[in-house]
Image: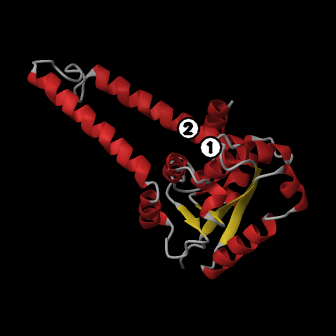
Amino acid sequence: MAATPAFVAYYRVSTDKQGKSGLGLEAQREAVARHVASVGGVIAAAFTEVESGKRNDRPELAKALAAARSRRATLVIAKLDRLTRNACFLLSIVEGTGEGGVVFCDLPTVPAGPVGKFLVTQMAAVAELEAGLIAQRTRAALAAAKARGVKLGNPQLRAGTPDAARAAAAAKVRQAAARAADLAPILAEIRAAGITTLEGIAKALTARGIATPSGRGAWHPATVARIAARAI
């Protein structure tokens, strides 16, 4: 039996007045609900932002992205302009959604997942072109430096060397820290609900469908302890 598709909804209104009155939110919620129902999915979490679309520092969006990644869910947004009109910011969000990708209800032909992420990325063509031009100039500069006899890279960093092992360990630590940061808001919600023991939190994470670091099986108290220590 196929798993039920999970979604994390993100809604945004521009003014505090709209946020308090619900103006604009109702239409967004209806659009999201229709899309989720059309694919037989469920909304695992929802976040509402009262902020201008011109601003990129959005705490509720950060929470929505963390929830989508931790649940391996799809981020769902009613309209593309509810997220941003800025190409660079759009590109960063698409890359930050995780495995589930992002779907916009006003773009029904763009699916979630890898294909959808690719198509949405094309909407950030200006930013992508600029990045490509920068990379092209960088490669040209490196080629010119190499032609002058400049040695590029770190010749000491070879597979199997202590330096390579340290680099791999550091990358693993960074990945674990990022995972802990994504889970921090969820751990806080569970504790706020009165569940404070490691065993209780493990059961709550499993019940919520939050993936373990390995992506397999149920949560264990020891795993929760490691994540919680990093999330402090």
Q: Left or right: where does residue 224 sit relative to residue 149?
A: right
Position in image of residue 161 (x %, y %) = 25, 23
Judge from the rendering whether residue 101 lies leftward or rightward of residue 105; answer left or right: left
Viewer-side residue, 37 vs 140: 140
Q: Which mark is residue 52?
A: none
Is residue 116 something one can see in this rendering?
yes
Quadrant placement of the N terminus? bottom right
What residue appears at the point 55 percent right and 49 percent down from the top-left corner? Answer: 86
Q: Are marks 1 and 2 in contact (CB under 8 Å)?
A: yes
Quarter that holds the C terminus:
top right
Q: Residue visible at 82% across and 46% down?
A: 195
**Disc 1 marks which residue?**
182
Please state which amino acid type lies under the numbered disc 2: Ala
At 60% from the left and 51% from the top, the residue drawn is 70
Amino acid beneath label 1? Asp
Residue 46 placement (x, y as % from top left): 73, 59
Residue 167 sits in quarter: top left
Q: Is residue 210 visible?
A: no
Secondary structure category for the residue under label 2: helix
Q: Depth check: 63 or 14 in front?
A: 14
Image location of residue 64, percent across then percent down: 66, 52
Q: Which labelled disc corresponds to residue 178? A: 2
Give whichever of 205, 34 is nearer the camera.
34
- Nearest the camera: 29 or 122? 122
- Image quadrant in which you'd find residue 180: top right
Tell me if mark 2 has few (under 14), some (14-19) or many (20+) residues whose alpha carbon lies within 10 angstroms of its own: some
